[in-house]
Amino acid sequence: MKKVVFFILCALVLSGCGPYTKAEKAQLKAAGVYAQAKDCTHTDSVKKMLSGDFQGKYIQSYCDLDISSTSGVNTLLKGGVPTKVVQAMINRENYHGSLAKRYAAYYKKQKTSAKQTILAVNTNQDLEPYSKTILVHKDTNPAYLVNKFYALPEGYEPRDLKPIQSVCTVGDTGCNSDELYLRKEANTAFQKMVKAGKKENLKIVAISGYRSYDYQLNLWTTNANTYGQDYADAYFARAGQSEHNTGLAVDITFNDHPFNEIENYKGYNWILKNMHSYGFILRYPKEKEKVTRYSYESWHLRYVGKKVAKTCFEKNWTLEEYWGNQ
Ligand SMILES: [Zn+2]
């Protein structure tokens, strides 16, 4: 058997990516290995091979020659991912070869399906919060991510902040009319939602909008110095990593109803059902803590634009899952 395998490997290597000789084909066929694909630099060839009777090791020896266009396949195979799972992975549209090492590690540990493995890694579920920080340089797409892995640059301030019209910052004597801000597009959408809510006899108010980089830095640092870093991380976002810094997130309530009890308010269902039509999503939903890395917040809405909001609403996706499915 060893001899046969040796011969096959030699045949594969020597023959390169070109067609096999008749004798080679016969040998390969006898060993249960038959290359239908002629060009191993082409992704489709490897897909064909994976769907055939080939074992991972043969594909490896064949495609080590040049597998640049089928990024990550060898890494997955070497990482112990079974051929069938590899095939299922690379056929998915949200597969990224550059993450193959992490897919393999996650699969080995969790034994999840190809679909679950890819989504988990694409949404950084295999990493510790704040263990990798990617700086966000563009704020033109309102659906961009800011979380425990994606950070705004130091001192970031949106250029188009506008004061919110419907505000209630609760003080000892009821609502104060402190100024709160959202970026122009989010602000307009919020006003439209407030107006529509009025027709339902709901008084939707903002209790928090844009927060500056320095405000968040101060908040986190004070808590970290007093109670330690773990405590600060559990309750406060780090500077540049709070969604409120984007000017696209708003905390809401009805009238002067306590914000952390709004889900008990009769109008809350209207918000849940309709906010996507105005471009908003509930950013930290129940039972998605593993993905968002935040506890459930019934009051925290994020403007992402109508299209993305609709997709998230229909598919029950968080913003992380939206991007993880791309
Ligand atoms: Zn909030």
Image (cartoon, rainbow, N blue to C red):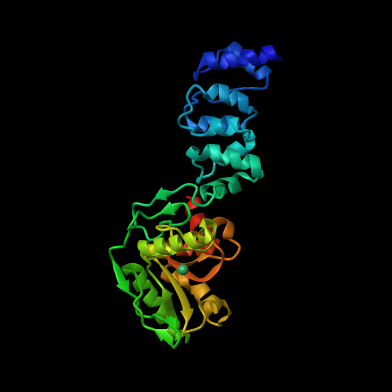
Image quarter where the N terminus lies is: top right
Report the front residue among 175 and 99.
Answer: 175
What residue is shown at x 34% (from left), y 55% (from top)? Answer: 154
Relative to 197, 128 lies left or right = right
x, y percentage for residue 163? 32, 75
Q: Nearer the viewer, residue 45 or 133?
A: 133
User: Which residue appears farthest toward the left when viewing the image?
Assistant: 159
The correct choice, above or below, for 172 with respect to 24 in the image is below
Which quadrant holds residue 195?
bottom left
Q: Determine whether 28 is above or below 94 in the image.
A: above
Specify the farthest residue to the right.
1
Query: On screen, 120 above or below 29?
Result: below
Q: Nearer the viewer, residue 236 or 80?
A: 236
Residue 275 screen position, x and y as percent: 46, 72
Whether residue 138 is situated above or below residue 167 in the rendered picture: above
Q: Is residue 103 visible?
A: yes
User: Residue 173: image x %, image y %?
Assistant: 44, 88
